[in-house]
Image (tube, rainbow, N blue to C red):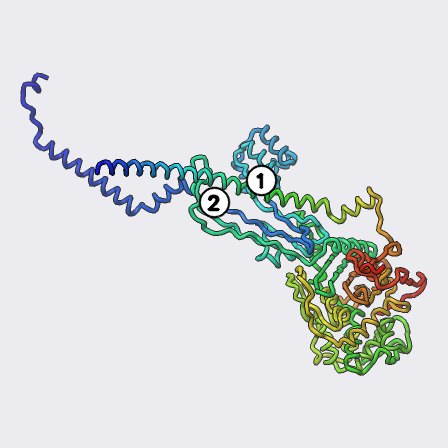
Amino acid sequence: MMRVNLVLLTVLIACALSLVTSRHQARKLFIDLEHEVAQTRAYDVEYGQLQIEQSTWAMPARVERVAREQLRMQLPTPDRVEMLDEGTR
Amino acid sequence: MRATASTPLRLPPLRAPLIFGGLLVLLVVLVVRSLYLQRFDHDFLQEQGSSRYSRAIEVPAHRGRIVDRYGEPLAISTPVKAIWAWPDKVEATPGEMKALADALEMPAASLSQKLASGGDFVYLKRPVAPDVADRIAALRIAGVHDETEYWRYYPSGEVMSQILGFTGDHDIGQEGMELAQQSWLGGRPGTRRVIINRRGDVVEDVASIRAPQEGRDLALAVDSRLQYLAFRELRAAVEANKAKAGALIMLDVKTGEILALANWPAYNPNSRTRAARDRMRNRALTDTFEPGSTLKPFTIAAALESGRVTPTSIVDTSPGTLTIGSATIHDAHREGVLTVEQVIQKSSNVGAAKIALSLPASAMWQTLSDSGFGAPPRTGFPGEVGGRLRPAKSWKPIEQATIAYGHGVSVNLVQLARAYTVFATDGELKPVSLLKLDGPVAGRPAIAPETAREVRRMLEMVVGPGGTAPKAQVAGYRVAGKTGTAHKLEGRAYTDKYVSSFVGFAPVSNPRLIVAVMIDEPSAGQYYGGSIAAPVFSAVMGTALRMLGVPTDAPVSNVVLPPDSAEIGEET
């Protein structure tokens, strides 16, 4: 009887210790998760800022100015445009 | 010492009971206190305890983006910092003040002026980039704080200012679509209860008190390239004609989507110094004007529907005036005998009035009402108006005659453009939408398909030889449309100020786009719709059709402009 009790006591202590460690592990992992979530949020913010930047650079007014002034492009006049109708020409 | 050693210990008789009693009292006090704490102070203590390890933290949710029909961002929220201070509590050495002024990129003098301005709360600068805010926090100046807030950016600036509107404090919509779609766009931050450790890291989620609700993205029907095109051309025309204002709208004929809606004057929504209310108004939706001749096609449609006239019926407009009671209607040019088609082509007021007077008022009212006049176009835009179309029963003959050529009724530009879907399709009035739709929508039949086709042919004659708007022609495409030049009503009298307009669609063989242009008070000499609004229509329509890759339906040499000296006949 005494021996059984001792065995059970050992098992109990082992269980208790593993509970403590797994709890600790869980908290550590949770902290990591929180950091990752915060990181995601930061990336979201950065993505938004990059979108603003991108669309500021791509504003039609600016594209037009660069095309006309720096690249010396111009709109083709209608008589220089050929319309293709589903490959019939 | 000797006495105590020699004599037996004699305690005072009451000492033991006293001590016993004292200890007992102390015990009772302790028990009562602990019972009291457990029972009455329980909640307070529990709260104190949990405040040591548990926190309710805010889960931020940001406002949804507004994008155009191809997903180009038009409005984005991003977190920024605001730097604020309690002026009385600011303690800083001159060196720290200078460092603060440098970080804020403002002169030290204006910084100290802000701090001396009194009051217990003052914003030093907003918005501030997060890294600048971190530098300021590192200075550790007492009384200077920062807070995170969301700031809305509009990359398209003034080009879309009136459609989008803007947001105010806490990123809540104040104007335009930002206001109309507040509940869709707005995010609601949530809160959750967590357990934190000694270092302040969150180690466990306890419960979610309120789930955050992220704002949703909103896709508008607007095409940002077409919008820019429309804005650029409109602005150039308003400035060239020294006009007070102008508006332009482009509709997709198949779906009724608003592809472009430009206004000038405009304002920059990114600037927090607010522009005058006048610049914020979306004139195309919130202002009405008397449409003038652009309403004539509806009069003719009503007449064709009644079966009383055909496109080739004869109307005698000589001598160019028509007197009804005490009022006289004038034509700007004497046209003599015209066919019904030519009444539209030459835009004869007398002709339109005579045709209208041959109709029952109720028939004319019905056609106008079926074409969407007198009721708001229901775009969901804040402040949208419906214009005025009085019930037919109250019409006097003179009113019926003036309504025939667009005076005595008022419309907004979106409504007018929408009404032309009746002629661009086979008689269907399409609903209009500011939001992106998935495909064609069914309209409501307003006039017979045959009538729509006949009026469409007349509208094509307007831009042809002998019409009032040769400047509306587009190389490579057949276009149809109608000019309008209306005297402005101020108080109860008509003035010598004008509203010039043009509404048209193209390509006529299979209409894709409707463009309506309105220029308010042109004052550089010209004021006819055919010379002010029609060129804007032509430039916008031509470029838009080519951008969209719409197949041409005419040779590119189709544009026949009369010599400049030739007179372009145009009526009010």
Work out which quarter of the rendered image holds the N terminus of chain B and state it: top left
Is B485 above or below relative to B7? Answer: below
Q: Confirm whether circles 2 and 1 share one chain.
A: yes
Mark with earlier residue (2, 1): 2
Using the rendered view, name the quadrant where residue B135 is placed: top right
Q: Nearer the viewer, mark 2 or mark 1?
A: 2
Query: In this view of the protein, which residue sits in the foreground, B95 or B153?
Result: B153
Query: In this view of the protein, which residue sits in the foreground, A47 or B10?
Result: A47
Q: Is residue A30 left or right of residue B475?
A: left
| Mark 2 secondary-structure assignment | strand
Residue B537 visible in rendering: no
| Mark 1 secondary-structure assignment | strand
Mark 2 crowdedness (10 Å alpha carbons): few <14, some 14-19, many ≥20: some
**On the image, numbered disc 2 is attached to which residue?**
B57
Task: Please state which amino acid type lies under the numbered disc 1.
Answer: Ile
Mark 1 crowdedness (10 Å alpha carbons): few <14, some 14-19, many ≥20: many
Residue B336 x/y as whole percent: 91, 77
Task: Please state which amino acid type lies under the numbered disc 2.
Answer: Ile
Residue B251 x/y as whole percent: 73, 62
Q: Chain of mark 1?
A: B
Query: In this view of the protein, which residue sits in the foreground, A17 or B442?
Result: A17
Residue B186 x/y as whole percent: 57, 54
Q: Chain of mark 2?
A: B
The answer to whether the residues at label 2 and label 1 have Cβ atoms under 8 Å apart is no
**On the image, numbered disc 1 is attached to which residue?**
B83
